[in-house]
Image (tube, grey):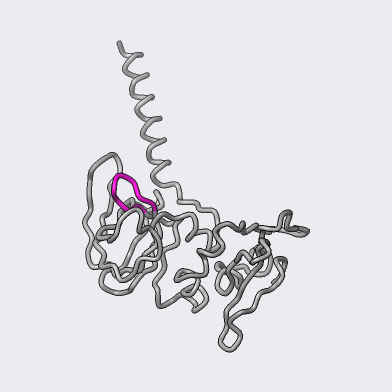
Amino acid sequence: MQPLCHQLLSLLFVFSSLQIHQLTEACSCVRSHPQDAYCNSEIVIRAKVVGKKLLKDGPFSTMRYTVKQTKMYKGFNKMQHVQHIYTYASDSLCGVKFDINKYQYLITGRVFDGKVYTGLCNFNQPWERLPLAQKKGFNHRYQLGCNCRIKPCHYLPCFVTSKNECLWTDMLSHFDYPGYQSRHYACIQQKEGYCSWYRGMAGRDKTTINSTDP
Protein backbone atom coordinates (compact mmCIF):
# COMPACT_ATOMS: atom_id res chain seq x y z
CA MET A 1 0.00 0.00 0.00
CA GLN A 2 2.81 2.39 0.90
CA PRO A 3 4.61 2.07 -2.47
CA LEU A 4 1.32 2.89 -4.23
CA CYS A 5 0.83 5.99 -2.07
CA HIS A 6 4.38 7.12 -2.80
CA GLN A 7 3.78 6.67 -6.53
CA LEU A 8 0.56 8.70 -6.39
CA LEU A 9 2.27 11.48 -4.42
CA SER A 10 5.15 11.53 -6.91
CA LEU A 11 2.74 11.80 -9.86
CA LEU A 12 0.86 14.59 -8.09
CA PHE A 13 4.10 16.48 -7.48
CA VAL A 14 5.17 16.14 -11.12
CA PHE A 15 1.75 17.29 -12.37
CA SER A 16 1.78 20.28 -10.01
CA SER A 17 5.29 21.22 -11.13
CA LEU A 18 4.21 21.11 -14.77
CA GLN A 19 1.18 23.29 -14.05
CA ILE A 20 3.29 25.84 -12.17
CA HIS A 21 5.82 25.87 -15.00
CA GLN A 22 3.08 26.48 -17.55
CA LEU A 23 1.60 29.32 -15.51
CA THR A 24 4.92 31.06 -14.90
CA GLU A 25 6.28 30.65 -18.42
CA ALA A 26 6.44 34.03 -20.11
CA CYS A 27 4.19 34.88 -23.05
CA SER A 28 6.07 34.79 -26.34
CA CYS A 29 4.88 36.54 -29.52
CA VAL A 30 6.18 36.75 -33.08
CA ARG A 31 6.77 40.34 -34.18
CA SER A 32 4.36 41.57 -36.81
CA HIS A 33 3.89 44.76 -38.79
CA PRO A 34 0.74 46.69 -37.73
CA GLN A 35 -0.65 46.14 -41.23
CA ASP A 36 -0.51 42.37 -40.64
CA ALA A 37 -2.19 42.95 -37.29
CA TYR A 38 -5.02 44.74 -39.11
CA CYS A 39 -5.35 42.25 -41.95
CA ASN A 40 -5.22 39.17 -39.71
CA SER A 41 -7.75 40.48 -37.17
CA GLU A 42 -11.49 40.03 -37.35
CA ILE A 43 -12.20 43.10 -35.22
CA VAL A 44 -10.35 46.44 -35.20
CA ILE A 45 -11.82 49.26 -33.11
CA ARG A 46 -10.92 52.43 -31.27
CA ALA A 47 -12.43 52.50 -27.80
CA LYS A 48 -12.05 53.80 -24.27
CA VAL A 49 -11.91 51.17 -21.53
CA VAL A 50 -14.37 52.18 -18.80
CA GLY A 51 -14.52 49.11 -16.55
CA LYS A 52 -13.33 45.58 -15.88
CA LYS A 53 -14.51 42.40 -14.16
CA LEU A 54 -12.65 39.21 -13.30
CA LEU A 55 -14.48 36.10 -14.50
CA LYS A 56 -13.57 32.71 -13.05
CA ASP A 57 -15.34 30.64 -15.67
CA GLY A 58 -12.79 27.88 -16.25
CA PRO A 59 -9.34 26.59 -15.30
CA PHE A 60 -7.88 30.03 -16.11
CA SER A 61 -9.50 33.31 -15.11
CA THR A 62 -10.66 35.74 -17.78
CA MET A 63 -10.76 39.52 -17.54
CA ARG A 64 -13.75 41.18 -19.15
CA TYR A 65 -13.18 44.83 -20.06
CA THR A 66 -16.15 47.09 -20.72
CA VAL A 67 -15.42 49.53 -23.53
CA LYS A 68 -17.04 52.60 -25.02
CA GLN A 69 -16.47 52.20 -28.75
CA THR A 70 -15.51 55.34 -30.65
CA LYS A 71 -14.97 53.89 -34.10
CA MET A 72 -14.92 50.52 -35.86
CA TYR A 73 -12.34 50.02 -38.60
CA LYS A 74 -12.97 46.36 -39.32
CA GLY A 75 -15.51 43.74 -38.26
CA PHE A 76 -18.86 45.10 -39.40
CA ASN A 77 -19.71 41.63 -40.70
CA LYS A 78 -19.11 40.17 -37.23
CA MET A 79 -20.90 42.71 -35.02
CA GLN A 80 -22.03 46.30 -35.29
CA HIS A 81 -20.88 47.46 -31.87
CA VAL A 82 -18.39 46.13 -29.31
CA GLN A 83 -19.23 46.48 -25.63
CA HIS A 84 -16.82 44.00 -24.03
CA ILE A 85 -13.28 42.78 -24.69
CA TYR A 86 -12.12 39.45 -23.21
CA THR A 87 -8.56 38.41 -22.41
CA TYR A 88 -6.75 36.06 -20.03
CA ALA A 89 -6.26 37.60 -16.60
CA SER A 90 -2.64 36.39 -16.44
CA ASP A 91 0.05 38.01 -18.59
CA SER A 92 1.89 34.66 -18.61
CA LEU A 93 -1.03 33.42 -20.72
CA CYS A 94 -0.69 36.48 -22.98
CA GLY A 95 -3.45 38.40 -21.24
CA VAL A 96 -3.35 42.14 -21.94
CA LYS A 97 -3.96 44.85 -19.34
CA PHE A 98 -5.80 48.07 -20.19
CA ASP A 99 -5.88 51.24 -18.09
CA ILE A 100 -9.39 52.25 -17.01
CA ASN A 101 -10.77 55.65 -18.06
CA LYS A 102 -7.35 56.83 -19.21
CA TYR A 103 -6.82 56.27 -22.95
CA GLN A 104 -8.61 55.58 -26.14
CA TYR A 105 -7.08 52.34 -27.39
CA LEU A 106 -6.65 50.89 -30.83
CA ILE A 107 -7.75 47.28 -30.16
CA THR A 108 -7.49 44.28 -32.47
CA GLY A 109 -8.87 40.82 -31.86
CA ARG A 110 -10.89 37.83 -32.98
CA VAL A 111 -14.50 36.79 -32.43
CA PHE A 112 -15.46 33.51 -30.78
CA ASP A 113 -19.03 32.67 -29.73
CA GLY A 114 -20.05 36.28 -30.21
CA LYS A 115 -17.28 37.62 -27.94
CA VAL A 116 -14.20 39.66 -28.87
CA TYR A 117 -10.92 38.20 -27.58
CA THR A 118 -7.51 39.85 -27.59
CA GLY A 119 -4.10 39.37 -25.99
CA LEU A 120 -0.50 40.53 -25.81
CA CYS A 121 0.22 39.13 -29.26
CA ASN A 122 -2.47 41.35 -30.78
CA PHE A 123 -1.91 45.01 -31.61
CA ASN A 124 -3.35 47.04 -28.70
CA GLN A 125 -1.99 50.54 -28.20
CA PRO A 126 -3.16 53.92 -26.87
CA TRP A 127 -4.44 55.82 -29.91
CA GLU A 128 -2.68 59.06 -28.94
CA ARG A 129 0.71 57.30 -29.00
CA LEU A 130 0.39 56.05 -32.58
CA PRO A 131 2.30 57.91 -35.31
CA LEU A 132 0.15 59.70 -37.88
CA ALA A 133 1.04 57.11 -40.55
CA GLN A 134 -0.28 54.26 -38.38
CA LYS A 135 -3.50 56.17 -37.67
CA LYS A 136 -3.99 56.64 -41.42
CA GLY A 137 -3.10 53.00 -41.91
CA PHE A 138 -5.83 51.75 -39.61
CA ASN A 139 -8.26 54.29 -41.04
CA HIS A 140 -7.92 53.16 -44.66
CA ARG A 141 -4.43 52.33 -45.98
CA TYR A 142 -3.78 48.93 -44.42
CA GLN A 143 -6.91 47.47 -45.99
CA LEU A 144 -5.46 48.29 -49.41
CA GLY A 145 -2.57 45.94 -48.74
CA CYS A 146 -4.23 42.86 -47.29
CA ASN A 147 -3.46 40.98 -50.52
CA CYS A 148 0.22 41.84 -50.08
CA ARG A 149 2.72 39.88 -48.01
CA ILE A 150 5.11 41.65 -45.66
CA LYS A 151 8.24 39.50 -45.65
CA PRO A 152 10.45 39.83 -42.54
CA CYS A 153 14.19 40.11 -43.07
CA HIS A 154 16.13 39.01 -39.98
CA TYR A 155 19.60 38.86 -41.56
CA LEU A 156 21.25 39.64 -44.89
CA PRO A 157 20.99 38.78 -47.68
CA CYS A 158 17.22 38.68 -48.12
CA PHE A 159 15.10 39.31 -51.19
CA VAL A 160 11.50 39.55 -52.32
CA THR A 161 10.51 36.45 -54.28
CA SER A 162 7.18 37.55 -55.77
CA LYS A 163 5.56 40.79 -56.89
CA ASN A 164 3.14 40.85 -53.95
CA GLU A 165 5.91 41.05 -51.30
CA CYS A 166 7.38 43.99 -49.40
CA LEU A 167 10.68 43.41 -47.61
CA TRP A 168 10.43 44.31 -43.91
CA THR A 169 13.91 45.23 -42.64
CA ASP A 170 13.18 46.83 -39.25
CA MET A 171 14.85 43.90 -37.50
CA LEU A 172 18.15 44.73 -39.19
CA SER A 173 18.41 48.42 -38.34
CA HIS A 174 16.47 48.83 -35.09
CA PHE A 175 17.06 47.16 -31.77
CA ASP A 176 13.79 48.52 -30.43
CA TYR A 177 10.34 47.60 -31.68
CA PRO A 178 8.53 49.06 -33.52
CA GLY A 179 10.95 50.19 -36.20
CA TYR A 180 10.78 52.83 -38.91
CA GLN A 181 8.82 50.79 -41.46
CA SER A 182 6.35 49.69 -38.80
CA ARG A 183 5.72 53.26 -37.71
CA HIS A 184 5.65 55.04 -41.06
CA TYR A 185 5.00 52.67 -43.98
CA ALA A 186 2.22 50.51 -45.41
CA CYS A 187 2.68 47.79 -48.03
CA ILE A 188 0.15 48.70 -50.74
CA GLN A 189 -0.88 46.89 -53.91
CA GLN A 190 -0.38 49.08 -56.97
CA LYS A 191 -2.47 49.19 -60.16
CA GLU A 192 0.09 47.03 -61.96
CA GLY A 193 -0.49 44.27 -59.39
CA TYR A 194 2.80 44.49 -57.52
CA CYS A 195 3.15 45.62 -53.91
CA SER A 196 5.46 48.34 -52.63
CA TRP A 197 6.02 50.37 -49.49
CA TYR A 198 3.96 53.55 -49.26
CA ARG A 199 4.44 56.54 -47.01
CA GLY A 200 2.04 59.47 -46.83
CA MET A 201 3.55 62.75 -45.68
CA ALA A 202 2.37 66.35 -45.54
CA GLY A 203 2.91 67.93 -48.92
CA ARG A 204 3.94 64.59 -50.37
CA ASP A 205 1.03 62.32 -49.70
CA LYS A 206 1.34 60.02 -52.69
CA THR A 207 4.86 58.69 -52.37
CA THR A 208 5.66 55.10 -53.18
CA ILE A 209 9.05 53.49 -52.83
CA ASN A 210 10.60 50.32 -54.16
CA SER A 211 9.59 47.12 -52.36
CA THR A 212 13.15 46.61 -51.13
CA ASP A 213 13.44 50.16 -49.73
CA PRO A 214 13.87 51.40 -47.04
Q: Quadrant of residue 73?
A: bottom left
Q: Quadrant of residue 128?
A: bottom left
What residue is rendered at 54% in x and 65% in y? Answer: 144
**Residue 159 visible to an observer of this rendering:** yes
| Residue 24 image point, x, y percent | 41, 47
- Say above or below: 130 vs 146: below
Query: On the rendered structure, is 32 left or right of 2?
Result: right
Q: With respect to residue 153, does 132 lie above or below?
A: below
Q: Is residue 34 visible?
A: no
Q: How many marks?
A: 0
Direction right: furthest residue: 157
Residue placed at 22% from the left, 64% from the top?
Answer: 51
Residue 159 spot, x, y in % from top left: 75, 58
Location of residue 200 with respect to 166 vertically, above or below: below
- Above or below residue 153? Residue 99 is below
Asked if residue 82 lies in the magenta stretch, the reply is no
Magenta region, residue range: 110-117
